[in-house]
Image (cartoon, grey):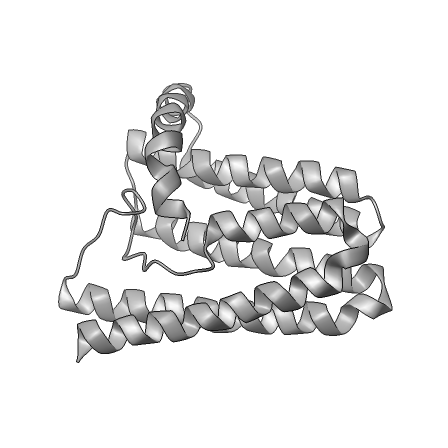
């Protein structure tokens, strides 16, 4: 919901940084995999109760996620890079609630519910992208991407805000997880309604 609105603000500085980074020979895939390792480190830190470290690593992961796309645009975007980027994103998104679930047994059920909602949201997102690609549909609302990005109530920005809130208020993890899982399910219905109107 917020991703497209933030793009005009964050893309110009990211693109400048991406050109500079590409100029010294760093590839987008290097940043993607480095960011994934850092994101997993954040989940591990959370699992051991180090919430501030987890928060710092989550933010670092998202910064690298923004930079890998900027580096790709500044050099030579590839389908393989787009594939690695989306796989790394979903692996990271799942790892954070998993970390909270490991940290405390009381978090296990809400973490499971949240991960399940992420799976549903991801499936609807990717299924929409596949059909849109077959039809030749295009959008640049989320910047230049490897495939069609359909807008939803729960997107990357909202997910990061939720992860930050979880790290700042870990005692409220269950409430936040259930609430955001509900928003993810609503996103699936919203995206499905859009699919009905576009693909019929």
Query: Which residue corresponds to the image point at 70% horizontal and 67% vertical from the top-left?
Result: 111
Question: Is residue 6 in sight in this rendering?
Answer: yes
Estimate the x, y position of residue 40 in percent, counting from the top left. 66, 49
Say whether residue 82 is left or right of residue 91. left
User: Is 74 rendered above or below residue 87?
Assistant: above
| View extreme (left): residue | 136
Query: Which residue corresponds to the image point at 40% horizontal and 31% vertical from the top-left?
Result: 10
Estimate the x, y position of residue 166 in percent, counting from the top left. 71, 52
Estimate the x, y position of residue 110 in percent, counting from the top left. 71, 70
Question: Is residue 40 in sight in this rendering?
Answer: no
Picture quadrant of residue 175:
bottom right
Query: As rendered, which of 130 and 11 lies closer to the eye?
Result: 11
Query: Which residue corresponds to the image point at 39% horizontal and 55% vertical from the top-left?
Result: 83
In the rendered view of the protein, which quadrant contains the C terminus?
bottom left
Say whether residue 49 is left or right of residue 53. right
Say whether residue 86 is left or right of residue 74. right
User: Is 41 rendered above or below residue 104?
Assistant: above
Estimate the x, y position of residue 193 in percent, counting from the top left. 30, 75
Query: As rendered, which of 137 and 82 lies closer to the eye?
Result: 137
Query: Which residue corresponds to the image point at 30% horizontal and 29% vertical from the top-left?
Result: 74
Picture quadrant of residue 93:
bottom right
Query: As rendered, which of 162 and 199 lies closer to the eye?
Result: 162
> So how many labels did they put on this image?
0
């Amino acid at each position: 919901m917020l991703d497209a609105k933030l793009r005009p603000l964050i893309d110009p500085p990211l693109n400048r940084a991406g050109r500079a980074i590409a100029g010294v020979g760093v590839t987008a895939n290097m940043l993607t995999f480095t960011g994934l390792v850092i994101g997993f480190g954040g989940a591990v830190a959370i699992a051991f109760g180090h919430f501030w470290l987890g928060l710092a690593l989550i933010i670092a992961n998202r910064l690298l996620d923004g930079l890998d796309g900027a580096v790709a645009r500044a050099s030579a975007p590839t389908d393989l890079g787009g594939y690695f980027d989306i796989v790394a994103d979903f692996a990271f998104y799942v790892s954070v609630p998993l970390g909270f679930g490991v940290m405390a047994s009381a978090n296990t059920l809400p973490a499971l519910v949240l991960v399940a909602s992420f799976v549903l949201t991801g499936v609807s997102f990717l299924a929409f992208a596949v059909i849109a690609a077959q039809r030749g549909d295009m959008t640049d609302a989320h910047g230049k991407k490897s495939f069609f990005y359909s807008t939803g109530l729960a997107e990357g920005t909202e997910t990061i805000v939720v992860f930050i809130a979880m790290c700042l208020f870990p005692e409220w993890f269950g409430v936040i997880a259930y609430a955001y899982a509900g928003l993810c399910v609503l996103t699936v219905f919203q995206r499905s309604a859009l699919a009905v109107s576009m693909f019929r």
